[in-house]
Image (spheres, rainbow, N blue to C red):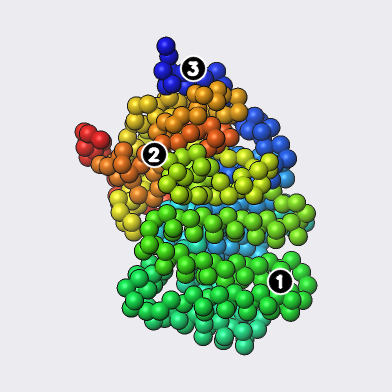
C-alpha cells in the first residue's frame, strides 16, 4: 500500500502546473481569484529572491488584469507610507532607493532589497501612466514595531494642521521618555516595575485624534483624507505597540496574537478607507507563510496562535485566496541572531517526509499547485512544513524551523520552487558577499 508521501508525489505530479516564466504562468491562479477581494501571498523565508520575484509577477497581473488597488506588506506603517507617497507621485524622493530609506531597522533587507526596489519602480512608472487618482496602485505596511516612528509621525501631522493638538500629543507621548531605547526596552522596564505603563496616554491620544476628525477632514481633497488616515493609523499603532511590547514578557502566544490582530485590523481599516475612495477596493498582501496560511490548520494554531490568514478567512470567508510558497534547498538571506548582520546562508535540504520533500520528488522544479484539485486526504496531512524567518539556525534545524501542518486547509494554492537563491540587500555585508560554505553545517539534525 502506498504511503502518504508516495501518494502526495503522485497527486503533485497530476495537478502541478509548471512555471516556465511565461506570461500565462498564473492564469489558473487568477481564475481561482475571480472577483475575490483579498489575495494573500506568503513566503517560506524572509530572504528568498524567487519568492519576492514571483509575488511581484503575480501582483502585477492582479493590478493590471484584475483591478487590484493596493499592496499591503509585512512592514512598518510609517516606513511603507513613505513608499506609498513615492509611488503616487506625492513625495520629493527622486527614486525608489530613496523612498525605501526609512527601512533601517533590523531586518532592513526584507524591504531594502533589489527585488522590492524593482517592484516599487514598476509601481511608480505604472501609476505615472494613469492620470486618475482612483486607478493608481498603492503600497502600505501592516506591522506594529515602529513605536517611536509612529509617535513622531502623529506629532508631525498635528504640527501641520493643529499645533495645540500637537503639543498635547507631545505631552502624552513624553511618558515613553522615562525609558531610553525602543519598544523592547520599554516593555522590559514595565515588566521589571522600573516604569509605569503608558497605556492611558496612548489611548487618550487616539481618542483625541478621532474626536478631531470632523474638523481635520473638513479640508477638501484626496491628500487631506489620506494624511488624516495615515496619522490615525499611526496613533492606533502606538496604542497596539505599547500593548505588544508589554506582552512580549508574558509569553510568545500573547504577543504573537496581539501582533497578528493588529495586522488584521490594519488590513480591515485599509479596506474600509479605500472603499470610501475607490468603491470596492481589492488588496494583495505580502507576508510570511506563518502569517498568511490559516493558523487553524497548524500545530501552532493548536497551541493557541491565530494569524492574519485565519482572521481574513473569518472576516471575508468567500472573498479571499491564501497562497503559500515552499522550497527544498538553496540559499537565503538571514541573520544568525536577532539584530545581527545579513548573511547569505545555505538552506539545508528539506526533511524526509515533509511537504517540501514531497514536492522535491515531483517532475517539475517550479510549479503552482492549486489545492482545490488535489486529493483532500493526501494533503490534509499533517506533515512537516518549514518556516525560516529573519533568523536561520541550521544547527537546530528541526526544532527551530519545522512544524506540522495540514496543507489543504492551510492554503488554497502552493507555489514550489525547488532550489532558491538569496535576496540581494541594497547594502550587502561582507558576510553576505562571501556567503556560507556548506562545510560549516553540522552533520546531524
Q: CA distance from mark 3 to mark 1?
A: 56 Å
Q: Is residue 19 visible?
A: no
Q: Look at discs 2 and 1 and give the one toward the viewer.
A: 2
In this view, the residue in front, 66 or 21, is 66
In the picture of the structure, the residue carrying the numbered disc 1 is 224
Would residue 294 be found to the left or right of residue 426 on screen?
Answer: right
Mark positioned earlier in the residue sequence (3 or 2): 3
Q: Look at discs 3 and 2 and give the one toward the viewer.
A: 2
Locate residue 367, reporting x and y percent. Answer: 53, 27
Residue 418 sits above or below residue 57 on the image: above
Q: CA distance from mark 2 to mark 1?
A: 46 Å
Residue 227 picture quarter: bottom right
Mark positioned earlier in the residue sequence (3 or 1): 3
Q: Circle 3 — which element?
A: helix
Locate residue 297, reporting x and y percent. Answer: 50, 39
Residue 4 sits above or below residue 113 on the image: above
Q: Is residue 183 visible?
A: yes
Q: Circle 2 — which element?
A: strand
Would residue 216 be found to the left or right of residue 357 on screen?
Answer: right
Q: Residue at x 66, y 74 (%)?
A: 210
Q: What is the number of the mark on residue 10?
A: 3
In this view, the residue in front, 383 or 164, is 383
Amino acid at each position: 500500500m502506498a504511503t502518504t508521501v508516495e501518494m502526495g508525489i503522485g497527486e503533485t505530479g497530476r495537478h502541478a502546473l509548471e512555471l516556465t516564466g511565461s506570461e500565462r504562468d498564473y492564469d489558473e491562479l487568477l481564475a481561482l481569484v475571480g472577483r475575490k477581494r483579498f489575495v494573500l501571498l506568503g513566503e517560506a523565508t524572509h530572504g528568498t529572491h524567487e519568492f519576492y520575484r514571483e509575488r511581484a509577477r503575480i501582483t502585477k497581473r492582479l493590478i493590471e488584469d484584475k483591478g487590484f488597488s493596493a499592496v499591503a506588506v509585512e512592514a512598518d506603517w510609517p516606513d511603507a507610507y513613505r513608499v506609498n507617497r513615492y509611488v503616487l507621485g506625492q513625495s520629493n524622493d527622486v527614486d525608489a532607493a530613496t523612498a525605501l530609506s526609512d527601512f533601517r531597522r533590523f531586518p532592513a533587507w526584507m524591504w531594502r532589497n533589489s527585488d522590492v526596489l524593482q517592484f516599487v519602480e514598476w509601481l511608480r512608472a505604472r501609476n505615472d501612466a494613469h492620470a486618475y487618482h482612483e486607478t493608481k496602485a498603492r503600497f502600505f505596511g501592516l506591522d506594529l514595531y515602529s513605536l517611536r516612528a509612529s509617535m513622531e509621525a502623529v506629532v508631525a501631522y498635528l504640527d501641520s494642521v493643529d499645533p495645540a493638538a500637537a503639543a498635547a500629543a507631545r505631552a502624552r507621548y513624553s511618558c515613553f521618555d522615562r525609558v531610553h531605547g525602543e519598544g523592547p526596552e520599554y516593555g522590559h522596564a514595565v515588566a521589571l516595575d522600573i516604569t509605569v505603563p503608558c497605556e492611558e496616554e496612548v489611548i487618550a491620544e487616539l481618542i483625541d485624534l478621532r474626536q478631531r476628525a470632523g474638523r481635520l477632514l473638513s479640508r477638501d481633497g484626496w491628500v487631506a483624507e489620506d494624511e488624516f488616515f495615515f496619522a490615525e493609523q499611526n496613533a492606533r499603532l502606538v496604542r497596539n505597540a505599547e500593548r505588544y511590547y508589554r506582552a512580549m514578557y508574558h509569553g510568545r502566544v500573547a504577543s504573537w496574537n496581539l501582533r497578528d490582530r493588529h495586522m488584521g485590523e490594519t488590513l480591515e481599516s485599509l479596506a474600509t478607507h479605500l472603499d470610501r475612495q475607490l468603491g470596492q477596493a481589492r488588496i494583495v498582501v505580502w507576508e510570511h507563510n506563518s502569517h498568511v496560511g490559516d493558523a487553524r490548520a497548524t500545530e501552532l494554531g493548536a497551541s493557541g496562535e491565530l494569524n492574519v490568514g485565519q482572521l481574513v478567512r473569518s472576516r471575508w470567508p468567500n472573498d479571499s485566496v491564501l497562497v503559500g510558497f515552499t522550497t527544498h534547498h538553496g540559499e537565503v538571506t538571514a541573520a544568525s541572531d536577532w539584530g545581527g548582520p545579513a548573511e547569505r546562508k545555505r538552506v539545508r535540504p528539506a526533511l524526509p517526509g515533509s511537504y517540501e520533500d514531497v514536492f522535491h520528488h515531483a517532475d517539475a522544479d517550479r510549479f503552482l499547485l492549486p489545492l482545490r484539485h488535489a486529493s483532500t486526504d493526501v494533503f490534509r496531512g499533517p506533515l512537516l512544513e518549514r518556516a525560516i524567518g529573519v533568523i536561520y539556525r541550521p544547527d537546530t534545524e528541526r526544532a527551530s524551523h519545522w512544524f506540522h501542518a495540514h496543507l489543504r486547509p492551510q492554503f488554497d494554492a502552493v507555489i514550489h520552487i525547488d532550489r532558491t537563491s538569496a535576496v540581494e540587500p541594497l547594502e550587502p555585508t561582507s558576510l553576505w558577499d562571501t556567503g556560507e560554505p556548506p562545510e560549516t553545517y553540522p552533520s546531524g539534525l
